[in-house]
Every structure is written in structure tokens, then in C-alpha cells.
Image (tube, helix red, strand yellow):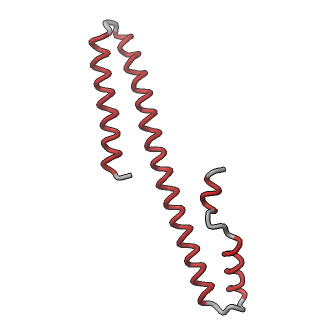
Amino acid sequence: MDKPFGFWTAVGGLGVLALITLVAIFRYPSTADATDVITAAGAVIGTVIGAFFGVQTGAAGRAKAEEGKDQAMAALVRVAALSDSGSPAARAAREAFEETPTSAVGDKAGE
């Protein structure tokens, strides 16, 4: 998600809430009725926008975790390739590489 899209999502939500506020003020003569409508609309709009940003933040965190996992796996492969194939470090690196599924981060996220 690019930053302007998130900004415009928040601005749009505030704009809709402002429009609902104006309509409620002129539609309902009682202050209590107008407040009820504005509060209900604000709760729904705030929840939807909050969920939108929560999902976007979670997706960004997952992408960063996947990138870190890929970098760690690449480093492990380089260590295994550069070390003596009979050394204990090379054997441990190969065993760790063979035991680690490539989608370990994704498998944990779905639990």
C-alpha cells in the first residue's frame, strides 16, 4: 500500500462523517437524536478504517518477516557452500536447511 492511498482513505472517512453530521443536524430537531446518528456513523466508519489499516500493517509485517526468512536461508546456503563439506558446521547447516520448510513463517501465521 502506498502512503497517499491510506491518507485518502482516512480523509474520505472523515469527509463522509462530516456529511453525515451536517445531514443529522438539519434532519433531526433534537440534539440527542442527531448525536445518536453521528455517534453510530462515527463508530462504524472508525471501525472500518481501523480494520483497513490493521490489515495493511499485518500484511507489511508478514512481507518483512518473509524477507528476513529468505535472507537467513540465503546466508545459511552460503555458509554451507563455503565450508568444508565434512566439517561439523557444514553438516549442521545442511541438516538445518533440510529440516526447515520454505514456508515456515506462513505456516505459523495461519494457526
Residue farthest to the top?
29
Q: Where is residue 63 in the image (x, y as percent from the top left)?
A: 49, 59
Q: In the displayed structure, would residue 73 be above or below residue 20?
A: below
Residue 76 location in percent, x, y?
A: 60, 78
Residue at image x 72%, y 92%? 86
Query: Residue at horizontal 47%, vertical 39%?
Result: 51
Residue 109 screen position, x and y as percent: 61, 53
Up/down of 15 relative to 64, above or below:
above
Tell whether 57 sits left or right of 23.
right
**Residue 52 falls left or right of residue 65:** left
Kindly identify the residue that appears in the image at 29 percent across and 31 percent down. Answer: 15
Residue 85 sits above or below residue 48 on the image: below
Where residue 33 appears, x then y in whole percent?
Answer: 38, 11
Q: How many labels does the image show?
A: 0
Q: Quadrant of residue 13?
A: top left
Q: Which residue is drawn at 62% across and 67% down?
A: 102
Q: Quadrant of residue 98?
A: bottom right
Q: In this view, does 44 lie to the left or right of 76?
A: left
Quarter of the image holding residue 91? Answer: bottom right
Position above or below: 42 against 90? above
